[in-house]
Image: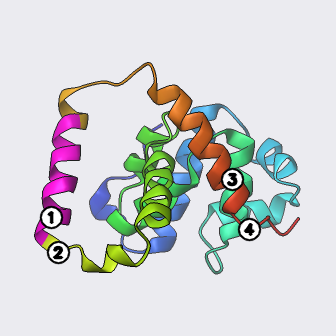
Amino acid sequence: MTPPDQSELESDSAVLSATIRGIRRLRGFSSSETAAGMNLVLRTYQDFEAGRGRLNVDYIYRFCHFVNADPDAIFASLSIGSPDFALRCSSNKLMSIVMMGMQQLNQQSGDKLATLDVRTIVNAVNALVRELIDKSAGGEEVDWLKAAEEQLRRARPKPGR
């Protein structure tokens, strides 16, 4: 089932709700299965999925761990107002891969990051986007992905439960 039309989504809560519900359904889990998989009571999970309450980063990570989705794509979907984006990235982990690259950039460049001019950044991002649109990747990228994913996992704070 696809999320509501983008024009219907007027708040972060609505985007988060459509995103979580869409990914859960895409993976074929019921609300009660997902609640149990996240170690939550059903009502708490239902409130989370409905977008009630404050944004809970721990719940997003727990949800993604259980349904094998991309947490960074969920955060990005909030930024761009598109639950469809998170659903499209739920299996290929596009945004987590981007964040792994940003982690490497930060580690290797350090304070030099602040000296990058906007034009250079825009050109690099546009080139990357064009390449991703034009090509599909495979091969040695899998090794990079595994190593970078492990490094990002070690760097991330542990969830609350």
| Tag 1: amino acid | Thr
**Residue shown at 53% from the left, 45% from the top:** 22
**Residue shown at 39% from the left, 52% from the top:** 4
* Tag shown at residue 157: 4
Q: Quadrant of residue 94?
A: top left
Image position, residue 57 (x, y; %): 66, 69
Q: Quadrant of residue 141?
A: top left
State how far apart marks 2 and 1 are (Cα). 6 Å
Circles 2 and 3 in contact, beta carbons < 8 Å: no
Residue range in magenta is 119-131
Circles 3 and 1 in contact, beta carbons < 8 Å: no
Q: Would residue 41 appear left or right of 108 to someone viewing this image?
A: right
Residue 129 shown in magenta: yes
Residue furthest top as drawn = 139
Is the residue marked by circle 3 packed among few (<14), some (14-19), or many (20+) residues within 10 Å?
few
Q: Earlier in the sequence, mark 2 or mark 3?
A: 2
State how far apart marks 2 and 3 are (Cα). 30 Å
**Residue shown at 42% from the left, 51% from the top:** 98
In this figure, which residue is indicated by the disc labeled 3?
153
Question: Which of pointers 3 and 1 indicates the residue nearer the eye?
Answer: 1
State how far apart marks 2 and 4 are (Cα). 31 Å
**Residue shown at 17% from the left, 29% from the top:** 134
Circles 4 and 3 in contact, beta carbons < 8 Å: no
* Tag shown at residue 117: 2
| Tag 4: amino acid | Pro
In this figure, which residue is indicated by the disc labeled 1?
120
| Tag 3: amino acid | Arg
Circles 2 and 1 in contact, beta carbons < 8 Å: yes
